[in-house]
Image: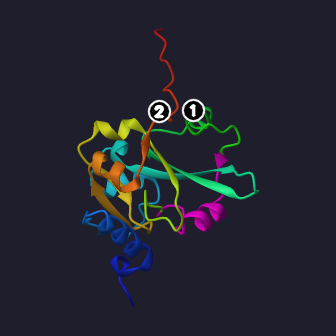
C-alpha cells in the first residue's frame, strides 16, 4: 500500500512544483491537518502561517463554474464583497465540497495552492507575506509543505490582493 507521500494527489502537487523548478519538502502526519488550528499545532507554527486554500466559484456565460482559489492566512476569513471586487464579479460564492473536489481534483482539507486539474485563478492574501515561511496542504489533509510566500505566489501564479475581512474595531471602554 502506498504511503501518503506516494499518493497520486501529493504527486500532482510535487510534479506541479517541479515543473517550475521547485523541490518541495512535504511532511506527512498521522493526524489530519484539516483545520488551520490543527495544522498550526502539528507544524509548531502560528495560525497566521497556515495557508488555507479556499475554493470559490463564479458562473460563466456558458453556465459553467469558474473556480477561484483564495490562499488565505489561517488567522483570516475571506470577505466575499472584497473578493467580488478583486475578481470583477458579483456572483462569487463559496464552492460546495463537491464543487471544490470536481473543480480542483482535491478534497477539502487537502486542497493545495496549485496543481489543480484545470487552470485556476488564484488570489493570495497579502497577510501571508508577513511571514518568512508558511505551510500549505500538499493534496491530502495529512500532508503539508513549508514554503516562502514569494515562492508560493510564483508556484500558484497568484495575484496578491486584500480579500480578508477587516478585523473588528475594538472600542475603548
Label 2 SS: loop
Left or right of residue 157: residue 60: right
- In the rendered image, residue 77, in percent from the top left (x then y), is placed at 51, 39
Which of the 4 image quarters holds residue 74?
Answer: top left
- In the rendered image, residue 168, in percent from the top left (x then y), is placed at 51, 23
- In the rendered image, residue 109, in percent from the top left (x then y), is placed at 49, 61
102 shown above or below 62: below
Sequence-first tag of 2 and 1: 1
State the residue in front, 157 or 146: 157
State the residue in front, 70 or 77: 70
Question: At 25% across and 48% down in the image, what residue appears?
Answer: 133
- Judged from this view, the residue extending furthest toward the top is 173
Q: Which residue matches tag 1?
A: 82
Q: Tell me whether the residue at label 2 lies in contact with that at label 1, contact meaning CB atoms closer than 8 angstroms.
A: yes
Q: Quadrant of the N terminus?
A: bottom left
Question: At 75% across and 57% down in the image, what residue appears?
Answer: 62
Dot 1, how many residues are within 10 Å of its Cα: few (below 14), some (14-19), or many (20+)? some
81 shown above or below 120: above
Left or right of residue 30: residue 122: right
Q: Which residue matches tag 2?
A: 162
Magenta region: which residues? 93-110
Label 1 SS: helix
Regarding residue 159, the answer to whether it shows in the image is: yes
State the residue in front, 7 or 160: 160
Question: At 46% across and 35% down in the image, what residue appears?
Answer: 161
Question: For the residues marked 2 and 1, what is the alpha-carbon distance in whole angstroms?
Answer: 7 Å
- 170 part of magenta stretch: no
Which of the 4 image quarters holds residue 7?
Answer: bottom left
Amino acid at each position: 500500500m502506498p504511503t501518503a507521500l506516494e499518493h497520486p494527489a501529493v504527486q500532482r502537487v510535487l510534479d506541479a512544483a517541479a515543473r517550475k523548478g521547485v523541490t518541495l519538502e512535504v511532511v506527512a502526519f498521522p493526524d489530519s491537518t484539516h483545520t488551520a488550528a490543527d495544522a498550526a499545532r502539528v507544524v509548531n507554527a502560528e495560525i497566521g502561517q497556515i495557508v488555507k486554500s479556499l475554493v470559490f466559484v463564479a458562473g460563466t456565460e456558458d453556465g459553467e463554474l469558474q473556480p477561484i482559489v483564495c490562499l488565505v492566512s489561517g488567522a483570516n476569513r475571506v470577505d466575499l464583497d472584497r473578493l467580488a471586487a478583486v475578481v470583477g464579479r458579483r456572483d462569487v460564492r463559496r464552492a460546495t465540497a463537491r464543487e471544490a473536489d470536481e473543480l480542483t481534483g482535491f478534497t477539502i482539507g487537502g486542497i493545495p495552492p496549485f496543481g489543480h486539474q484545470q487552470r485556476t485563478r488564484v488570489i493570495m492574501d497579502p497577510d501571508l507575506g508577513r511571514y518568512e515561511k508558511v505551510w500549505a496542504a500538499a493534496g491530502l489533509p495529512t500532508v503539508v509543505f513549508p514554503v516562502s510566500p514569494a515562492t508560493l505566489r510564483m508556484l500558484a501564479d497568484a495575484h496578491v490582493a486584500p480579500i480578508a475581512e477587516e478585523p473588528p474595531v475594538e472600542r475603548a471602554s
